[in-house]
Image (cartoon, rainbow, N blue to C red):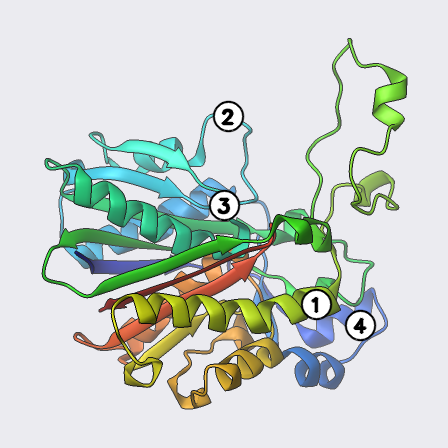
Amino acid sequence: MGLHILGTGSYMPEKILTNDDYKEFIETNDEWIRTRTGISSRHIATGEPTWYMGAQAARSAIEAAGIDPADISLVIDTSVTHDYATPSTSCIIQRETGAVNAACFDLNAACAGFVYAMDMAHRFLKTEETAKYALVVANEQLSKITNYEDRSSCILFGDGSAAAVVEYDANALYSSHLGADGTGAKHLFAKHTEYNSPFAEESKLKKKWHDFEEDLQGRFAHCMKQDGKEVYRFATQAMPKAAKAAAEKIGLALSSLDKIIPHQANIRIIETAMKNMKLSMEKAVVNIKNHGNTSSASIPIALDEAVRSGEIKRGDKICLVGFGAGLTYAAAILEY
């Protein structure tokens, strides 16, 4: 009933933005950022497309898995910062990697997207008898939708990508729990492009259709808006809830896990979530210091780095757990 990770890969843009660099355009300092977020630096794209970043990570994961890309049956991409409304980024990843026999689709569950996609891959591989492998890609350029005049949020976000090649293994450990609370959608969101149909009616364009904030104009109109306190409150409860629910399905004690790979949003969120799970921070894989929050890419980047450094080894029981805009939350327990 399980999922086996064959290979992982990641890619980060070359440009690194340190905390001190922010002093050039907003009022802040390194100590203020580090003590409140745990972040010292983050990678920032300087023109390369989001799909390109994902393709680089995907190639690395395929190489690590040692498989023929033609044997990949499914490609899922989880970006919230696509380069195109259509085609899907997953189709471009297929083209770039040679996964010519794969079905492709994109999935948007924000920062919990990678865990959602891993679960979708598991369900597909389990039920599709002829399927061999799935490729899950998380590639994000949050710098595209960050308001760099908002000192409370712009310091949090970075760019990056990661990927994993997985196969179904009936004898392997696996459990998951996915959830969402749409009433909290207003606490973290970014608008899409402007409505420009020639049939638009002014009265409808001006109508307030929802309770989302809409106070930013001009070049910041489509940047992320976040209620930090509400997101913190949700995250510190939702991640433990998801992890516990996934563990209970298979009668597993969270204390028996070797590693937790949480969404890297804020060190305080990670610390509080681990405390609420009654687990030591020693079990948490944390790389937020050098990456910041990279949305759906944060969990697989941390996973790939932990695998390549030896922090996670074959046979380790791990839990991927995250939360995101929506508000979404998800956890998956498996044996690496």
Query: Residue 282: x, y in percent?
Result: 41, 89
Q: Is residue 147 above or below residue 26?
A: above
Distance between the alpha carbons at the discs numbered 3 and 1: 20 Å
Residue 69 visible to an observer of this rendering: no
The disc at residue 79 is 3
Distance between the alpha carbons at the discs numbered 4 and 3: 29 Å
Look at discs 4 and 1 and give the one toward the viewer: 1
Which residue is pictured at 33% across the width and 79% down the height? 259
Distance between the alpha carbons at the discs numbered 2 and 3: 13 Å
Label 4 SS: helix
Per the image, the residue denoted by label 2 is 86
Per the image, the residue denoted by label 4 is 23
Q: Which of disc 1 and disc 4 is earlier in sequence? A: 4
Mark 2 residue type: Thr
Look at discs 3 and 1 and give the one toward the viewer: 3
Mark 4 residue type: Lys
Q: Which of disc 1 and disc 2 is earlier in sequence? A: 2
Which residue is pictured at 27% across the width and 55% down the height? 61
In this image, 54 relative to 36: left or right? left
Is the Cβ of the residue at disc 3 closer than 8 Å to that at disc 1? Answer: no
The disc at residue 155 is 1
Query: Residue 198: x, y in percent?
Result: 78, 9
Q: Which of disc 3 and disc 2 is earlier in sequence? A: 3
Look at discs 4 and 2 and give the one toward the viewer: 2
Label 2 SS: loop
Is the Cβ of the residue at disc 4 closer than 8 Å to that at disc 1? Answer: no
Label 1 SS: helix
Query: Residue 47: x, y in percent?
Result: 58, 45
Q: Is residue 50 above or below residue 147?
A: above
Q: Which of disc 2 and disc 4 is earlier in sequence? A: 4
Mark 3 residue type: Ser
